[in-house]
Image (tube, grey):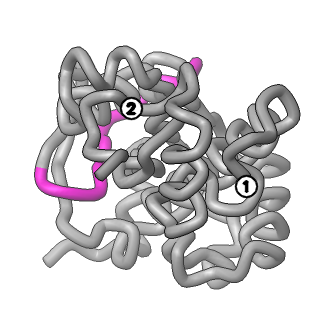
Amino acid sequence: MFNQNTLSLMYTVCGIDEAGRGPLAGPVTAAAVILPPDFPFTILDDSKALSEKKRYEVLSAILETAVDTGIGWAWPGEIDKLNIHYATLLAMKRAYMGLQTSVEMVYVDGKFVPDIPVPSKAIVKGDMKIREVQAASILAKTARDRWMIRYSWIDGRYGFEKHKGYPTKEHRSRCIEEGLSPIHRKSFRILP
């Protein structure tokens, strides 16, 4: 088993994670994060384990001190064309390609790695084990949530600012009443 404490000192390590595989609407978003050795790692956790307020506090620390970050998006049309699995890998590749810093190793949350030109390892529950993946989890989740909130300013019929496109009862009811929006994933089972 590797020692996470010495890993970042020996190599430039990047963590990649995604947010938004399960929603009925909106993009799937991925983030790539490289942290400095002196980052306050104790503040990190999987984004799902943090309250919204705490997520944004930790996000500020990440954005202020990260060596580099990248965000990648795969849009609803791409999700419908490729399927959510391949669209997620595409978003991850785009997040990696957004980095300006060379890395020697990439850790990805999950079972699969995107097609990127650097050694990569998929780690199941990586967002609970690898600090760079935890930071990427927070960045991806907050970026996607903000995108969905802003889209709700354009189209307020669905309540995206509340549920962020996830399949809540309210969201499905509004889809039945209003029909589907341009950002709904048509390949997903949305309507009964």
> Quick one: 59 or 41, which is closer to the camera?
59
Tag on residue 134?
A: none
Mark 1 = which residue?
A: 62
- Quarter where residue 117 is shown: top left
- Relative height, residue 101 to residue 13 (above, below): above
Give the residue displayed 30% in from the left and 67% down from the top: 126
Tag on residue 185?
A: 2
- Image spot of residue 134 (x, y percent): 49, 65
> Quick one: 80 or 168, which is closer to the camera?
168
- Relative height, residue 156 to residue 136 (above, below): above
Magenta region: which residues? 100-111
- Image spot of residue 68 (x, y percent): 63, 35
Give the residue displayed 35% in from the left and 46% down from the top: 190
Pick whichever of labels 2 and 1 is earlier in the sequence. 1
> Helix, strand, or loop for circle 1?
helix
- Give me the C-alpha separation between circle 2 and circle 1: 31 Å
Give the residue displayed 76% in from the left and 53% down from the top: 161
> Helix, strand, or loop for circle 2?
loop
Few, some or many residues within 10 Å of mark 1 (<14, 14–19, 20+):
many
Few, some or many residues within 10 Å of mark 2 (<14, 14–19, 20+):
many
- Relative height, residue 172 to residue 175 (above, below): below
